[in-house]
Image (cartoon, grey):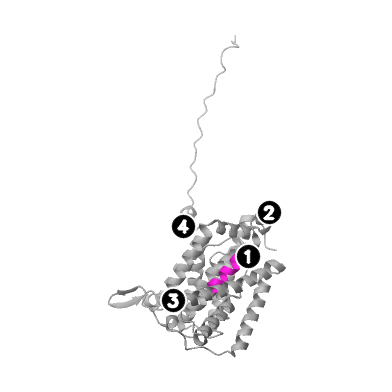
Amino acid sequence: MLDVNSPLPVKNTPAKKTVPPKKSLAHPLRRLLPRHNEGYLAWVLVVVVVTFSLLSDQFLTLQNLLDLSESYAVSGIFALGLFVVLVTGGIDISFAAVASVVQYLIATLAMHYGLANPVLSIALAVAAGALLGMVNALLIYGLRIVSIIVTISMQALLFGMLMWLTNGRSLYDLPEWWTMPLQVLPFSVGGQEYQIGLPLLVMLAVALLTWLLLNRTHLGRQLFAMGGDQESARRIGIRVGLLHLFAYGYLGAMAALGGLVQVYRVGEVVPNALVGGELDVLAAAVLGGASLNGGKGSVVGTLMGVFLIGMLKNGLNLIGVSNYFMNVVIGIVIVAAITVTHYKKRKETDVGFV
């Protein structure tokens, strides 16, 4: 007779063996994939350096790298100023015209009105550049006009007036403080004398200032917030109009400073020397991770974008590639960078191309 209180017999079933998941070969490689835009740029720079080093024995020399840094220091200063505007969601391509106007203004005051004080000259140049940049901001924010339309118009206006009033004449009789080469941080390697020039040091100082502004100040956080969503930034009390004035004024100031550095490098003021290179500067900022919609990017990425374009042009020139084909290569790089950026954004938001 079965006792109802007795426990039911339990059938002993052998435990199932757990099979460990197979290790994918792609898993270790996935750790090498960069997580940020700067990481991708670093890999691209390594590929470019290795490629051109194999194709030309002059590329990876200390003198060539120093010359490359000096040559693209002005573009770096422009790109850092433009990056601040891009962070806010705007765009400004009139910086080259602003730099040209400021160059001619300071040179004229020095040659004909006795402006000889370098500190006063630099301060006046920066103030004039900032003022011209703020005019852009007033038109963009006050009249609610798309930024690229305003800045294209301003570029045409400033450059046209400069060429008309000066007849395109270059200025050569400049003060010594502006053109005299300075011995800055000289050093020797293997018996050869080298030096880190003033343009590179100015660019690094501007990079540090811009990094501190955007990453260590409340103002910088507000600039990123405005670029992320301008209407939301306005609703939480951010003074969007003042931020427009600051961002475009900052670019104008950096344009003026870059213009002064460019004259220091070449020793003359040429009215049309800077106009036409806006695409390289914009491309550098975009390659560095700056979004044309605002709210993204970094100072380090911007500098990496500048030197990526510089290395491409320098390397192609050393191996004898035509200047016309260089523009083709730069265009391909820009399209590839924008495509990757939008692809990553689509993957993040699960929104396809329109």
Secondary structure beneath dot 3 equals helix
Amino acid marked by disc 1: His
Amino acid marked by disc 2: Arg
CA–CA distance in space, label 2 to label 4: 42 Å
Q: Is residue 252 on the magenta stretch?
A: yes
Residue under the image location 47 percent in, 86 percent down: 174
Which of the 4 image quadrants contains residue 277? bottom right
- Pinpoint residue 237: horizontal percent, then vertical percent: 65, 54
CA–CA distance in space, label 2 to label 1: 16 Å
Amino acid marked by disc 4: Leu
What is the residue that sits farthest to the left in this orientation?
Answer: 191
Q: Nearer the viewer, mark 4 or mark 1?
A: 1
Residue under the image location 50 percent in, 38 percent down: 18
Q: Nearer the viewer, mark 3 or mark 2?
A: 2
Mark 2 or mark 4, which has the lower sequence index?
4
Q: Nearer the viewer, residue 168 or 21?
A: 168
Q: Which of marks 4 and 3 is in front?
A: 3
Q: Mark 3 points at which residue?
A: 70
Q: Name the residue under label 1.
A: 244
User: Which mark identifies residue 32?
Assistant: 4
- Pinpoint residue 184: horizontal percent, then vertical percent: 37, 74
Mark 3 or mark 1, which has the lower sequence index?
3
